[in-house]
Each structure stands twice: as C-alpha cells, then as structure tokens.
C-alpha cells in the first residue's frame, strides 16, 4: 500500500474511532498486520494480500448459482486434515521451517517450464504430505524463517538420490507479486498453498485471518484473479473456475458447535473458501498437526455446502499482476 504521511496516519486513526471496521478499507486505512507463520517472524504475505481480504460484504457473483449447481452441494464440508488411526503421519499438509543456513539442492521438475528453478531447501527432515511413500499429492511446504521465503513443491520425491517434483514455486512472503500469467505452482490455480491452510495455532488462539483452500471435482478451463492457471476439464463456464471464492452465509447458525468450530465458521463467513485445485468436492485443507481436536473435526463436518455462495472479488483488484487489494 502507499506510504502515508504522519498527518494522514493520525486522521486515519481518528476515523477508526467513529466508523465500523468494515468501512475502513474504502477510506484507504491500513489493514491489521498479518499473523506470522508459526516458528518465524514472517507474515503470510502482506496484510493487504487477497488471502487476507474480508469478503463478508462483497456482492454475490452473478454465476454463483450456476457454479454451485455443479459442485455437489447436497453434501457437507470435509476437513482434509486430522489424526491418522493407522499409525501414519496424520492427514494434512505439513509445514517445514528452516533457517538461511539450510543446504539448498537442485530439483528436477516434470513441468519445468512453469516452475521456479530454485535451488530449494530440501533435505532429510523435509516433511512431505502423506509421507515419502504416499500415492497422493506429496506437497512439500518449506519456509525460510530468516529470508521470509516460501518454497512449495507438488509430487515431491527422491529418485536415485536426487530430488524431483511435478512442479514448484518460490515466493517472497513480503511481496504481493503473482506468478507469470498461465503458470502453475504447487497448486493447480498457480496460487501459494500456505496462506490457505487452516492451522491449529490459529484456531487455538482465535487468530484466523485468511481464506481457506478447498477443492472440487470438475472445474472449467479458466481462472479468476489472482489465480494464474487452471486444470479444468470443460470449457463450460457454468462450472467453477480456479480462484473462485465462496463465502458461508451470515445467516448459517453455528449453535451447538464447539468454541473452536465457531471460530472457523466465523472465518468462513468473513474470508471464505478459495477453489485452488481439483479433488474431492468440498474438502478443505489444513496443516498436519497432532493436536487437532476430534470434536472440532466432527463439528466442521456438519457445515453444509449448500450454505455457501460465490462472491465477486473483482472490485478488490488493484493490478493484474499483484495480489494486493484495494
């Protein structure tokens, strides 16, 4: 955002005393500082990043009903994270935090033309989604706490002693810059995964300040800003595109849910869900963590998909190549 003079900063503070918080962005007031990644002093991208945008008052997208008609809204949400009861590492996408001295290695990519070359700070202690022998997506998310850089890879594995992945992306957590138009990332939408993960420490401390990543099975061959890529199966635009954002209706009651679940519900009403990949309908992602409460997970499974609407976020865009919002 633009740097304000001290006088303007004082005026913004006075305005904040008399106006509802929801009106402040329209007047150019600075948003609250984004919460840091656990184990670091690095925020999950700047506070004015699209992932942190409050969409509770945005209009419903004109294609909302069409998209939802192709998204199995007769089911309920499914948290794609939690404990594993077969002795496995647990469900969810793990986050590995390293320092600037961690060795960096070259990675060979299957989609090299749309991947950042690196090198990447991968090693024996790098945690991979589902474990190294998994048949799933095998995402690896690594945060360099000293440089505030984010490294993400998909289909991550070691072959003949060398690291390989399907695709990979490197991000500065201090920047709103997007990937080149048309490029994938470790996600089909060409977006970072980390800012869309629900994390236990955020729920525990009631500090959820971002939208949540989710999937559906059939998407169209287009995408909405700030997404940069699609993996669609149809040209029919009545199917949802990558980057579409869905908000839980404010009228949906969380009565009877646990306090932790009510915090997540509140975040879904304020920040919403982001369609970022193809997968099981209405599965939403969180970090792999051994302390996820079973009651929370069961409560989240009670949220009906039919209680969501797609919102139009186009008014938030400041630049085609930036995730910064107005």
Image: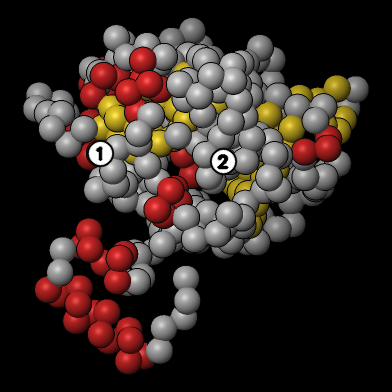
Q: Circles 2 and 1: CB distance less than 8 Å?
A: no
- Label 2 vs label 1: CA separation? 21 Å
Q: Image point 26% across, 67% down: which residue?
A: 24
Q: Image point 32% across, 50% down: which residue?
A: 54
Looking at the image, tell me whether mark 2 or mark 1 is earlier in sequence order: 2
Residue 199 spot, x, y in % from top left: 41, 38
Query: Relative to 90, is 64 on the left or the right?
Result: left
Which SS class for mark 2? loop
Q: Residue furthest left?
A: 255
Q: Nearer the viewer, residue 221 or 17?
A: 221
Query: Relative to 82, is 298 on the left or the right?
Result: left
Numbered label tally = 2
Q: Is residue 183 above or below residue 284?
A: below
Query: Relative to 49, is 251 on the left or the right?
Result: left
Residue 34 spot, x, y in % from top left: 41, 58
> Label 1, on which residue?
269
Residue 89 spot, x, y in % from top left: 53, 20
Which SS class for mark 1? helix
Q: Residue furthest bottom?
A: 7
Quadrant containing the C terminus in the rendered view: bottom left
Residue 181 seen in this snapshot: yes
Q: Quadrant of residue 66?
A: top left
Q: Nearer the viewer, residue 166 or 307?
A: 307
Q: Nearer the viewer, residue 322 or 81?
A: 322
Q: Which mark is residue 227?
A: 2
Q: Quadrant of residue 9?
A: bottom left
Residue 128 seen in this snapshot: no
Rendered image coloring scheme:
secondary structure
């Amino acid at each position: 955002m633009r740097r304000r003079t001290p006088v303007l900063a004082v005026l913004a503070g006075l305005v904040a005393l008399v106006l509802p918080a929801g009106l402040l962005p329209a007047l150019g007031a600075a948003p609250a500082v984004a919460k840091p990644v656990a184990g670091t002093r690095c925020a999950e991208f700047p506070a004015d990043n699209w992932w942190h945008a409050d969409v509770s008052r945005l209009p419903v997208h004109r294609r909302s009903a069409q998209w939802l008609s192709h998204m199995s809204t007769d089911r309920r949400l499914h948290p794609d994270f939690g404990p594993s009861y077969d002795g496995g590492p647990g469900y969810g996408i793990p986050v590995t935090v390293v320092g600037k001295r961690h060795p960096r290695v070259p990675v060979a990519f299957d989609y090299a033309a749309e991947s950042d070359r690196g090198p990447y700070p991968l090693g024996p202690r790098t945690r991979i989604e589902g474990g190294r022998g998994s048949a799933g997506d095998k995402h690896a998310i690594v945060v360099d706490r000293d440089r505030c850089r984010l490294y993400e890879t998909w289909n991550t594995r070691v072959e003949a002693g060398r690291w390989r992945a399907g695709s990979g992306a490197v991000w500065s957590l201090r920047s709103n810059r997007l990937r080149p138009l048309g490029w994938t990332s470790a996600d089909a939408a060409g977006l970072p995964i980390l800012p869309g993960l629900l994390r236990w420490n955020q729920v525990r401390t009631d500090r959820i300040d971002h939208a949540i990543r989710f999937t559906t099975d059939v998407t169209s061959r287009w995408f909405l800003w700030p997404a940069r890529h699609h993996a669609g199966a149809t040209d029919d635009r009545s199917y949802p595109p990558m980057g579409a954002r869905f908000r839980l209706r404010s009228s949906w009651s969380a009565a009877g849910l646990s306090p932790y679940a009510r915090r997540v519900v509140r975040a879904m009403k304020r920040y919403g869900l982001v369609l970022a990949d193809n997968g099981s309908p209405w599965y939403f992602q969180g970090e792999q963590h051994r302390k996820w409460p079973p009651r929370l997970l069961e409560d989240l499974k009670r949220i009906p998909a039919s209680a969501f609407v797609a919102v139009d976020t186009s008014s938030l865009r400041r630049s085609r190549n930036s995730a910064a919002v107005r």
